Amino acid sequence: MSYLQEIENLTNLIKEDPTNFQARRELTVALMDKGFNEEAIKQLTYLISVFPEDSRLHYNLGIAWDKLKNFKQAKKAYETALSYEPEEPDFLYNMGYVCLENNETNMAIHYFEKVLEHDKNDANTYFNLGVCYRNIENSQKAISCFEKALELNEKDILANFYLACELQKTGEEEKAQEQYKQVIQNCPDYSWAYFNLASIAFKEKNYDKAIDYLKKTLELNPKDIEASKIYARILSLINKISEAESVIMTALQYNPYCGDLYYYLAKLSQKKGDNQTYVIQLKEAIKNHETLSIPMKIIQAELKKAQGHEKN
């Protein structure tokens, strides 16, 4: 039986007998499974009016709000569920997750640690704890949590990637590279892993390797502005100006309002000695100032100086 058929059958049962609460409970689950969360909330709200102390109803209401990204209402529902069953691991986990989504990191840590008191082998909880510590820039604890998550679930690609990021952040770049390569082995299309490998290679001035990783990054995600900028910068450093311009022009096809890209193009024109194009691209960068990472006063000063050269 399809979900839609199941929903129709359960709805008909409730029409025949509005007091068929079991059918109504099953209907709420079917509605959530199919993505009809607003209707599920209506049914759950009615059931809660009849069974106000049923913790599972409050928990399911939290899940429905959670799916709608209304984390404030979800938290309220989970709090009520926990008031009836304060040690239920599922309730604690979801409460931790919604606190994390609400940027209440310390509270999220509290609930996730409570989950681990009940189950020390919950890989998802270790992962989310790692995210919490990552958010408050406690890299050592984040690393420990991501390592534990991977120990329990070695195929957790996101834990693998975040572990690599934290290792890179703490300067353990050799270990970070190993982890990024593991990410790629498990998920060959993970563009950010290639990009971060490129960043490490660029830092080490291993330009050939960086270019290889950047090409792969842009093959998988041609809209990646940062990859295009680093790629162009490397090509400029090795005096391949035309190739660098080509990289930026391609990037502009995907990001036509990126001020940074126009500024990079301006700097390449300056390097070629083409002051006229340099001025044009600086003006384009200023026109797209909302997407600039370079302070406007720097670009405006460059433009003023370049226009002075034009008059001379």
Image (tube, helix red, strand yellow):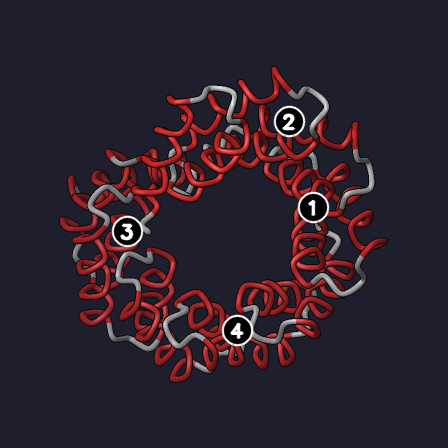
Question: Is residue 131 rendered to the left or right of residue 230?
Answer: right
Q: Residue furthest right?
A: 117
Mark found first going from the N terminus, 1 or 2: 2
At mark 1, the secondary structure is: helix
Q: How far, Cα to Cα, is label 1 from label 4?
A: 40 Å
Mark found first going from the N terminus, 1 or 4: 1
Say which of marks 2 and 3 sits in front. 2
Q: How far, Cα to Cα, is label 4 from label 2?
A: 45 Å
Label disc, if present, on residue 261 of the rendered structure: 3
Q: Please name the amino acid that badge 3 sits on.
A: Leu
In the rendered image of this protein, does residue 102 appear above or below residue 227?
above
Label disc, if present, on residue 90 of the rendered structure: 1
Label disc, if present, on residue 200 of the rendered structure: 4
What percent of the width, then of the height, locates residue 243? 20, 72
Q: Residue at x 30, y 68 (%)?
A: 220
Q: How far, Cα to Cα, is label 2 from label 3?
A: 46 Å
Q: Residue at x 25, y 43 (%)?
A: 282
Q: Decide which of 27, 209 is in the foreground and name it.
A: 27
Provide the residue designation for mark 2: 77
At mark 3, the secondary structure is: helix
